[in-house]
Image (cartoon, rainbow, N blue to C red):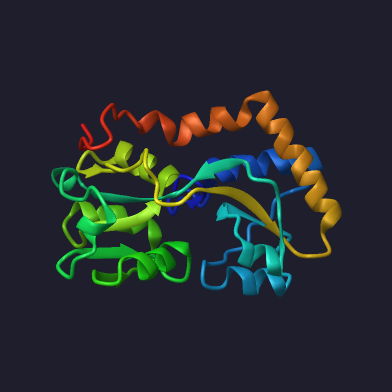
Amino acid sequence: MPMSYLNPETGDYVGFDTELAKDLADELGVTIEYVKTSWPSLMEDMLAGKFDLAICGVTINDTRKEQALMSDGYLENGKTILCRAEDAYTFTSLEAINRPEVRVMVNPGGLNEQFARENLPDVTLIIHDVNQEIPGLVASGEADIMITEIVEAGYYVGQDDRLAAPLIYEPYTDGEIGILMQKGSEDLMNYVNEFLQKEKNSGRIDELAEDYFFKYIEYEDTNKPAA
């Protein structure tokens, strides 16, 4: 969450990108078939043809564009942190975080782990397989920091008042989220780009963003902990 999450109780996928995928399927007149993947195996599964496109908070970067096609960006994003609310005044910079006694938890194989290894070499790095479990583990004291994206941070702060994202308005990276496709799928990519532009023009992207994460971001002072 908030991009795409399989609800174990209902068996249904929910989230921003899930709704966007449904809109795209309606435009194409097709039925969605969901295929599970993971950050470590995402590109391998794409190149193996296990699915036609990947849409779940996939950041556009040069490495991915060298191996596959990526749509135009449809959502701005960037790396930030989640911490406990009482620590919001402590963790105000990378320098304040990058200490051996600080436990940083990330999911394996993606850009969160890469960012932590490149920018926080002195922390105690904890790899946890299930990304959506990490905010709760930070809140309960199993870790001190989660490296995440601003869209995730806003959602989780809204779900748990033990959490804060004190640097949410000052992300460490600037990026955009796009849709990943195989090379050779240029016709599909062109269609997807036209679809995304229509979703932007209609206000649908803004509507989904407000529903799933921005409504939770209520900071007036970026260094204040969550209320």
Q: Position of residue 45 (x, y in %)?
A: 64, 72
Q: Position of residue 145 (x, y in %)?
A: 25, 57
Asked whether 34 or 66 is in front, the reply is: 66
44 on left or right of 162: right
Q: Residue at x 49, y 48 (%)?
A: 174
Q: Residue at x 48, y 29 (%)?
A: 210
- Look at the image and tell me in which quarter the C terminus lies: top left
Asked whether 21 or 105 is in front, the reply is: 105
Asked whether 114 or 3 is in front, the reply is: 114
159 on left or right of 46: left
160 on left or right of 208: left
Q: Position of residue 195 (x, y in %)?
A: 75, 38
192 on left or right of 225: right
Give the tally of numbered discs.
Answer: 0
Q: Position of residue 221 (x, y in %)?
A: 25, 30
Above-or-below relation of 94 to 92 = below
Residue 29 visible somewhere in the drawing:
no
Q: Residue at x 63, y 63 (%)?
A: 62
Above-or-below relation of 134 to 214 = below
